[in-house]
Image (cartoon, grey):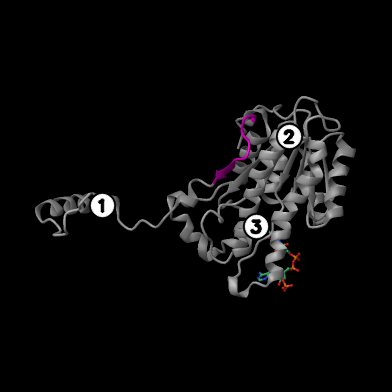
Amino acid sequence: MESPFKADILKGKVALVTGGGSGIGYEISLQLGKHGASVAIMGRRKHVLDSAVAALHSHGIPAIGLHGDVRKEDDAARTVESTFKHFGRLDILVNAAAGNFLVPAEDLSPNGFRTVIDIDTIGTFRMCREALKYLKKGGPGKDPSTGGAIINISAILQFGASWYQIHASAAKAAVDSITRSLALEWGEDHDIRVNGIAPGAIEDTAGVVKLAPEEMISKVKQKPLSKFGEKWDIAMAALYLASEAGKFVNGTNLVVDGGQWLSKPRFLLKDDVKQLSRREEIRSRVAPTGLPKSKL
Ligand code: COA
């Protein structure tokens, strides 16, 4: 799909995207690049990174791949430094690296829980912390009058409770909290805007393959508010938040899910509810319940 944004809205900017080799992270990298940014992508799988960088180059996007794991302090520091060394500045950090799997809470080991917290939550904080000195207003290579932007990829599963994802729910709830805390502190102190994006079910992603097996998909697709989104939808939200279009947006978690998280089972059909509601109204007037009158 064609972007509704002008092609130069990120001209001269440099973005670092963790988990940028595939899925939502790759699509964000591609769209940031198509709108003028140079892009560094970080990931654990070298061959995935290599083909993602080649694909970005084929679109004429200046891009590098940086092999690393957000769970490792040294990798986080080296990735940020390499991005700066290669492109001379850093304006946008997108934390898209994440881990998840379906498991009943009683079968999850503390180490399994910790692993997801380490990738999603601490990994996000680790990357933000390493990137701070480059993102802040007056940071090396930056325009002295403005700071950069951070986008944390969140989720919708933690808004309520989700089956078999206690670890990821806790991890993403903490990511949302990090988004707000950094938006407050770094917005005020360093002119850095920190926002989140909460994607719903997005087709062709590891999330859907791992978390919504075929057996679930046919059921989900029947509900109008639960249709699948595209990676493009998330990338457009990222463009909005990263560009001047979002210059007054700080600390929000932009839900991009087609209304999915609001979805609840419909117990009554629309036509039935009209009749039932009227019938109960009339019945209560004709035959009062007999309850004692309120003294209020
Ligand atoms: N069910 C239950 N426990 C699981 C599990 C599963 N499906 N997968 C991993 N674990 C547990 C392991 O048993 C281990 O705990 P233990 O030491 O107590 O046995 C712990 O999690 C770490 O597993 P390991 O395979 O060593 O971790 P890893 O670093 O190789 O992989 C994951 C990290 C588990 C998060 C892996 O799923 C991953 O790499 N995910 C990235 C991609 C992804 O999930 N994308 C979807 C995003 S929505």
Residue under label 1: 273
Q: Which mark is residue 171?
A: 3
- Ligand 1 shows up in the quarter that is bottom right
Whole-Å distance between the Cαs marked 3 and 2? Answer: 26 Å
Residue displayed at 22% across by 51% down: 277
Residue displayed at 63% across by 44% down: 180
Q: Which mark is residue 122?
A: none
Residue displayed at 63% across by 63% down: 167
Q: Is residue 17 visible?
A: yes
Task: Report the amino acid beneath label 1.
Answer: Val
Q: Where are the magenta residues, as a range?
A: 247-256
Residue displayed at 69% across by 68% down: 112
Image quadrant assignment for residue 39 = top right
Judged by depth in the image, the label closer to the viewer, 2 or 1, is 2
The percent position of residue 92, horizontal first and vertical second, equals: 74, 37
Of callouts 3 and 2, the N-terminal one: 3
The percent position of residue 275, horizontal first and vertical second, equals: 20, 51
Task: Report the amino acid beneath label 3.
Answer: Ala
**Image side of residue 181 versus residue 104, left or right:** right
Residue 197 on the magenta segment: no
Marks 2 & 1, CB-CB < 8 Å contact = no
Whole-Å distance between the Cαs marked 1 and 3? Answer: 40 Å
Q: Is residue 52 visible?
A: no
Judged by depth in the image, the label closer to the viewer, 3 or 2, is 2
Marks 1 & 3, CB-CB < 8 Å contact = no
Of callouts 2 and 1, the N-terminal one: 2
Residue under label 2: 189
Quarter of the image that includes the N terminus? top right
Task: Report the amino acid beneath label 2.
Answer: Asp
Marks 3 & 2, CB-CB < 8 Å contact = no
